[in-house]
Amino acid sequence: AVQLVESGGGLVQPKESLKISCAASGFTFSNAAMYWVRQAPGKGLEWVARIRTKPNNYATYYADSVKGRFTISRDDSKSMVYLQMDNLKTEDTAMYYCTGGVSLDYWGQGVMVTVSS
Amino acid sequence: DIVMTQAPLSVSVTPGESASISCRSSKSLLHSNGITYVYWYLQKPGKSPQLLIYRMSNLASGVPDRFSGSGSETDFTLKISRVEAEDVGIYYCGQLLENPWTFGGGTKLELK
């Protein structure tokens, strides 16, 4: 069965950094584009970042709200995807979901990131 | 950015009856390859979102055939026939045609 398991969330202060991770299993990870989608408390879904596969040069894309502050990366040898978040703002407080599949078929359980002083 | 607008914000349905949720995009989601890149997701209470419908009208694996998707280039409908208790949650439409991918604000389905 497909599994996506996020980790690394927590409470940080504004302007600090945090790196969250996602461990994937149950599908051919190296063939799959991967994404991060977030959901602020009581709000809807917001796509954050996308990373394509090796044949597509691991191209990355970001929402304007995080461009220049967040970096998505992947390690195909470990079936892992990461989100490095720098210069965090209070408005980045959200549940962060790791997702995969052409249609966002697979979703992890999410990891909470809270940015507060 | 493509704006996705859903209606209504919430819908209350008697079990066994049907429900429809609308979604409108600010730009055509019909690609030149003939595929319409609109998707539907359900987030059950306290859970992660799950894929229901992909490419406007295709049922995701394991999703009951009580769910169906239809539409045109900019107007889309999710229909749920014979609503059951397990269908309660927030439904989101989304477009995966062009970056940034965007979602509608969500429609909450409750039971009467």
Image (tube, rainbow, N blue to C red):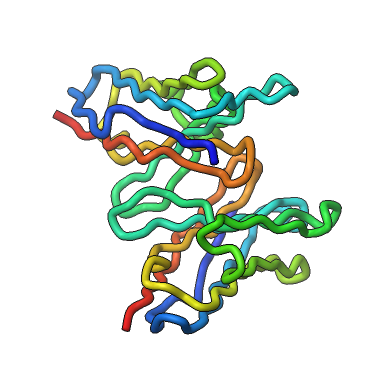
In this rendering, the answer to whether B60 lies above or below A44 is above
Residue A13, image x, y percentages: 39, 83
Report if residue A3 is visible in the image.
Answer: no
Residue lying at 37% horizontally and 72% vertically, measured from the top left: A90
Residue at screen point 52% across, 33% down: B39
Along the line of sight, which residue is nearer the eye, A99 or A50?
A50
Q: How many labels does the image show?
A: 0
Who is closer to the viewer here, A106 or A113?
A113
Left or right position of A37 against B43: right
**Residue occupying image coordinates x 69% and y 52%:** A33
Q: Farthest residue toward the left?
A: B112
For residue B34, side relative to residue B56 (left or right): right
Q: Which residue is drawn at 38% across and 66% down?
A: A91
> Residue A23: which quarter of the image?
bottom right
Residue A117 appears left or right of A55? left
The quarter of the picture where the N terminus of chain B appears is top right
In this rendering, the answer to whether B72 lies above or below B9 is above
* Residue B93 appears anywhere in the view: yes
- Residue B45 x %, y %: 29, 49
Return the x and y of residue A72 as percentages of the image width and height: 64, 66
Q: Is residue A86 above or below residue A39?
A: below
Could you say where residue B58 lies in the image, as x and y percent from the top left?
Answer: 57, 25
What is the quadrant of the C terminus of chain B in the image? Answer: top left
Residue sitting farthest toward the right: A55
